[in-house]
Amino acid sequence: QKEVEQNSGPLSVPEGAIASLNCTYSDRGSQSFFWYRQYSGKSPELIMSIYSNGDKEDGRFTAQLNKASQYVSLLIRDSQPSDSATYLCAVNKGYGGSQGNLIFGKGTKLSVKP
Amino acid sequence: DAGVTQSPTHLIKTRGQQVTLRCSPKSGHDTVSWYQQALGQGPQFIFQYYEEEERQRGNFPDRFSGHQFPNYSSELNVNALLLGDSALYLCASSPTVNTEAFFGQGTRLTVV
């Protein structure tokens, strides 16, 4: 079982729709969870971090965490063509002063059609 | 506020050669981590530096080594390059107080 799993896609949604990206992780000791956006040929850009069970909203983005189910998701509302990118889920066992390292999934490629 | 900067942006080396990549962390960040990203894959953790010491290491051979300087900048060295070392090398910095990591633009290494 891979440590962090994502559906590789591609996930195609029409402009204005909600895009739903999912991620599962295997280590119950994981404490910090992140979503990165990566445009083709570019480096990953941090868009959301979440540490507690529940939802966290930032603009059009909502991250959801369920530690009991070992599941993290990212919702993108009112999707725009500029959201077309690969979305990487990353998990870190460290928290606060304990620096861990990021374990990434392979990423889900999102395509938003005008 | 300058973000994480890496140099060079692109590099072509011959199999067997050695390479050094450089990274300057975001202002206020003291922890630097290096990742390797092959095409179509997520980044893979190489190692992490804090207080000029290697604190954690991923599953990479000893050909991969690094250094952190007193100003928190860092270098990644790869010896005896193999064709399979061709990848995007990413540097990420983070503050001690939390685990949010920010990436530089990466160095694209091609080994021929």
Image (cartoon, rainbow, N blue to C red):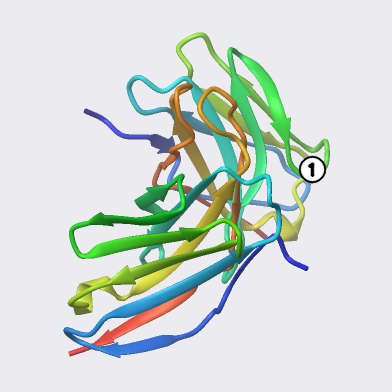
Q: Residue tagged by mark 1?
A: B80
Position of residue A80 measured from the top left corner of the image (x, y, whole percent): 19, 77
Which chain's residue wears label 1?
B
From what the image shows, is residue B54 above or below residue B80? above
Outermost residue toward the right? B62
**Residue drawn at the location 58% of the way across and 55% of the way down:** B43
Residue B92 visible in the displayed image = yes
The part of the image, by quadrant, that contains residue B7 is top left
Position of residue B82 measured from the top left corner of the image (x, y, whole percent): 77, 54
A37, A48: nearer the viewer: A48
The part of the image, by quadrant, that contains residue A77 is bottom left
From what the image shows, is residue A17 above or below residue B6? below
From what the image shows, is residue B40 above or below residue B55? below
Total of numbered circles in the picture? 1
Position of residue B64 measured from the top left corner of the image (x, y, whole percent): 74, 37
Which kind of residue does numbered mark 1 sit on? Ala
**Residue drawn at the location 41% of the way across and 23% of the way down:** B29
Q: Is residue A112 left or right of residue B91?
A: left
B13, B60: nearer the viewer: B60
**Residue drawn at the location 30% of the way across and 76% of the way down:** A84
Residue A107 visible in the displayed image = no
The quadrant in which the C terminus of chain A is found is bottom left
Mark 1 residue element? loop
Position of residue A40 measured from the top left corner of the image (x, y, whole percent): 39, 68
From what the image shows, is residue A94 above or below residue B43? above
Outermost residue toward the top? B70
Category of crowding for the residue at label 1, using alpha-carbon neighbours closer than 10 angstroms: few (below 14), some (14–19), many (at least 20):
few
The quadrant in which the N terminus of chain A is found is bottom right
